[in-house]
Image (cartoon, rainbow, N blue to C red):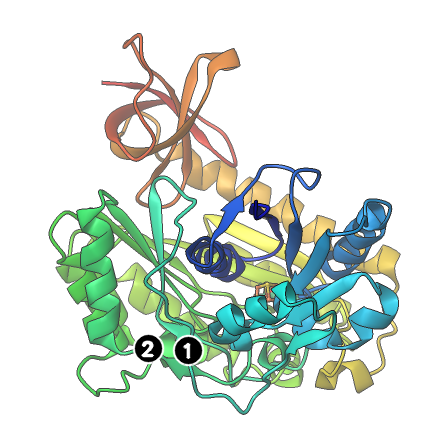
Amino acid sequence: MATEKTFYLETFGCQMNAHDSEKVIGTLEHEGYRQVESEEDAGLILYNTCSIRDKAEQKVFHRLDEYKRQHREGKRFAVLGCVAQQEGEKIFERAPYVSLVSGSASYRKLPEMLVRLEAGETRITGLDDRQTDETFETEFTARQNPYRGYITIIEGCDKFCAYCVVPFTRGKERSRGSDSVLAEARRIADQGYTEIQLLGQNVNSYRDPEGKRSFAELLAAVGEVAGIRRVRFTTSHPRDFTRDIVEAIDAVPTLCDHVHLPVQSGSSRILKAMNREYTREDYLERISWIKAARRPISISTDIIVGFPGETEEDLIQTMDLLAEVEYDCVFGFKYSGRPNTPALTMIDSISEAEKARRLQVVLDRQREIQRVNYAKHLGQIMEVMVEGANPARGQVIGRSSQNKPVNFTCAQAIAPAPGSYVQVKITATHPNSLAGEAV
Ligand code: 5AD
Ligand code: SF4
């Protein structure tokens, strides 16, 4: 009797990776594999890795070391994603029990690589780098998120920000045809999804290869798919962020009241060193478009502190920008030098302790800004999409259109299912969440 083919997959990193994993799982299942919940039960163990900062990368190598002990006859290991692309064949030296190393630009070749794995090959690589023009589209996506349907619209990145590893790990920019995106949106709406998140490293540089729709037009068209109630998109790059995106949000009610617009720094001098191709003023102009929208759109951002050469004056400019924009959410990071990136050749003289201090200063300031922002919702009634429950606290967990977490109580005996929508009256506010009761 043939032994059953089983796999365990663990994902690190961003939503692009989470969605890549859904496509990889679908591909594996189509090839006759069954997903299992633990490494012990699996014949094939896959890690879909992230290398955005050194800490993320170290996590993967720790995990590989941890499971080295389990390397028994018949158990195979595969390293996928950004660390795979970055480290390539060096992974075989560091972890000789790994049989397959593949970056995301090579996933379209997975079925073929799996056949070679089954035939007993032990050093299989998929390391297509910036040469490939092809995207990874599959009809076998095994969606793991019960309430949010991810759809990739653009892969790779051509921006080359000085600190960023992504252009080296995800290859060059390649957009997917808008008809194909819309067909997938209709398919998942038919499956019962009401929220769609469009994904790309830089969705604003989307260029329809068929020339039919701009990004804003595609956004609006997805928002008009029957059954879809919420559309989100990530990530935007300020340089390519155009006014028609705000106009689309104004015109199409299903497009969520939220834009994630990573600024990285409030200092034009640092932005130039980062090769971001916009100034503080350019950025603030885009913010003014968003703020002029007919409905209030929440704005979130990413900040890097401690980029090589960042002074106290640069940091003050970042702090001033936080206050000026009044963000609803900030993801802050300490600069981490990454392989291949131009910033690696700059003198990184800011100590870890100083980076940590700067990060804390930024996050403390932001907490106060959010305390004020979130307090404005007190007494409002808003639509919340349910994401889960916290039975211990008798609360349902969800999110507003503005992407704010809302925890609420509900008189019903059975908690509303993930993906359902509830009107909630806000009775308390915190710097990072809202609380209320279903009405
Ligand atoms: N060091 C620290 N943070 C980084 N990011 C990207 N590269 C680095 C790096 N080398 C942050 C940016 C980006 C987010 C996803 O991660 O803020 O927007
Ligand atoms: Fe990590 Fe960036 Fe790769 Fe996403 S694209 S997995 S954040 S390195």
Any mark on residue 358, and which? none
The answer to whether residue 317 shows anywhere in this view is no
Image quarter where the N terminus lies is top right
Residue 39 percent coordinates (x, y)? 69, 42
Q: Amino acid at mark 2?
A: Arg
Left or right side of 213 for 436: right
Q: Which residue is the site of mark 1? A: 135
Q: Is residue 96 above or below residue 347?
A: above
Q: Secondary structure at mark 2?
A: loop
**Distance between mark 2 and mark 1 Cα atoms:** 7 Å
Q: Are marks 2 and 1 in contact (CB under 8 Å)?
A: yes
Coordinates of residue 75 in the picture (x, y in percent): 73, 51
Q: Residue furthest bottom?
A: 131
* Residue lying at 60% horizontally and 79% vertically, measured from the top left: 271
The residue lying at 17 percent from left, 83 percent from top is 212
The residue carrying mark 2 is 176
The kind of residue tagged 1 is: Thr
Tell me: 270 left or right of 247. Answer: right
